[in-house]
Image: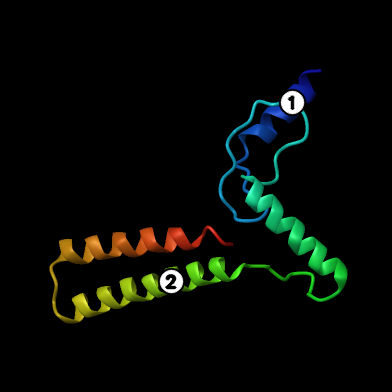
């Protein structure tokens, strides 16, 4: 019995992530099957992807995005590029270390926002 309890406790300590978007799943003390998705929209997107793959129209590793999701991703990529360009421009202009640090923090924040669609 002790080995089973340790195995369950070990699984709960591992950080689990949504199988669709990659967000960290909340720790759950529920008994039963562990969650795979953070929310219903992620579950729905995963279902749509599986259905499209089964129809044979997409490769196995395809990701299905709505046009709104694609536009959002393109906007966030543009923000990331602009943040990187800001750092390059500031460094070329001889900006102070504190300014470069602030810009680098902004770049990291923007990049983390892109991780939502892994």
10 Å crowding of disc 2: few (<14), some (14-19), many (20+) = few
Relative to 104, residue 4 above or below: above
Residue under the point 75% across and 63% down: 49
Q: CA distance from mark 2 to mark 1?
A: 40 Å
Circle 2 SS class: helix
Relative to 34, residue 112 above or below: below
Residue under the point 21% across and 66% down: 100
Q: Is residue 40 left or right of residue 116?
A: right
Q: Which mark is residue 113?
A: none
Q: Which residue is mark 1?
A: 31
Residue under the point 78% across and 75% down: 58
For the C terminus, the quadrant is: bottom right
In percent of width and height, residue 110 lies at 38, 62
For the N terminus, the quadrant is: top right
Colour mode?
A: rainbow
Give the image quarter of residue 29.
Answer: top right
In percent of width and height, residue 78 lies at 40, 75
- Of tags 2 and 1, the one toward the viewer is 2
In percent of width and height, residue 51 lies at 82, 63
10 Å crowding of disc 1: few (<14), some (14-19), many (20+) = few
Q: Is residue 41 left or right of residue 51?
A: left
Question: Disc count in the image?
Answer: 2
Q: Is residue 92 left or right of residue 15?
A: left
Give the image quarter of residue 103.
Answer: bottom left
Residue under the point 14% across and 72% down: 95
Q: Which mark is residue 75?
A: 2
Q: Is residue 102 left or right of residue 95?
A: right
Relative to 18, residue 103 above or below: below
Give the image quarter of residue 62.
Answer: bottom right
Circle 1 SS class: loop
Closer to the chain start, of discs 2 and 1, is: 1
- Closer to the camera, 79 or 106? 79
């Amino acid at each position: 019995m002790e080995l089973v309890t340790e195995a369950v406790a070990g699984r709960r300590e591992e950080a689990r992530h949504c199988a669709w978007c990659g967000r960290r799943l909340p720790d759950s003390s529920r008994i039963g099957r562990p969650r795979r998705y953070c929310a219903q929209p992620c579950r729905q997107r995963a279902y749509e992807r599986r259905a499209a793959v089964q129809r044979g129209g997409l490769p196995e590793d395809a990701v299905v995005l709505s046009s709104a999701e694609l536009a959002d991703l393109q906007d966030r990529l543009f923000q990331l590029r602009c943040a990187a360009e800001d750092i390059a421009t500031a460094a070329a202009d001889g900006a102070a270390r504190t300014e470069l640090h602030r810009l680098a923090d902004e770049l990291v924040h923007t990049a983390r926002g892109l991780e939502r669609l892994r």
